[in-house]
Amino acid sequence: ICSVISLVAIVILLIERKEKKRPYLQITFELIRDNLVCLVLRNVGETPAILRKISFSERFVKQLPSGGQTHLRNRDDLSLTLYPNQQWVIDLDVISSTVFQYECHTLDVTLEYSKPRQNRRRYKETSSICFDDYMSFLVYISETDELRQYRINATIRIIQQVPSKNCG
């Protein structure tokens, strides 16, 4: 009985290890520069991923301006490689206050991807981004952002105070 339990434990560990050694793609909603609505596609796995297909809910996409509709067109012919910790940003070409006024507040995204050189084994992830959930939250400005802005403002003040030398 002990050997059977040990064998089961080994099989479980091998399965977990195999799952850990695969790519994991995720797509999230983020605001860039405080209100530009973007989707960020990340590989949070430990191996490269090749994005093969991406699709978006048509009902939401139809509400976007033409630039955003172009960026969110469904693609089933991709071969886009994302390495671990790499990310790509998709601009929806709209600001947050506009998205919050849309009739359809939910964007469904489906990703299909594989490991390099393993096109047969495909992984599929589906995410729903409900912009309604974000409507009541404020944009967080980190202390680092505040410090960076203070430094920029201080530099501008110093430059303005230094008399310019005209050569001539």
Image (cartoon, rainbow, N blue to C red):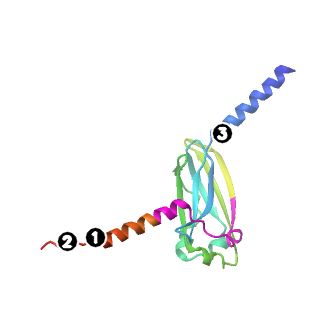
Q: Read off the residue under disc 3.
A: 20
Number of numbered labels in the structure image:
3
| Quadrant location of the N terminus in the rendered image | top right
Q: Amino acid at mark 1?
A: Val
Cα distance in 3D space between marks 1 and 3? 57 Å
Q: Which residues are magenta?
A: 127-149
Q: Amino acid at mark 3?
A: Lys
| Quadrant location of the C terminus in the rendered image | bottom left
Element on which disc 3 rests:
helix
Vertical comparison of 16 with 91: above or below: above
Vertical comparison of 81 with 134: above or below: above
x 54%, y 55%: residue = 78
Q: Which mark is residue 50?
A: none
Number of residues whose C-alpha sits closer than 10 Å to that of mark 2, classed few (under 14), some (14–19) or many (20 or more): few
Q: Check if residue 23 falls in the magenta segment.
A: no
| Nearer mark to the viewer, of 1 and 3 | 1
x 62%, y 60%: residue = 28
Q: Quadrant of residue 161?
A: bottom left
Q: Amino acid at mark 2?
A: Lys
Residue 81 or residue 37, whichever sits in front? 37
Counting residues from the N terminus, which is met first, the one under dot 2 or under dot 3? Answer: 3
* Residue 79 seen in the figure: no
Q: Which mark is residue 162?
A: 1
Residue found at the far left of this picture: 168
Vertical comparison of 20 with 66: above or below: above
Element on which disc 2 rests:
loop
Q: Read off the residue under disc 2.
A: 165
Q: Check if residue 147 falls in the magenta segment.
A: yes
Vertical comparison of 58 with 4: above or below: below
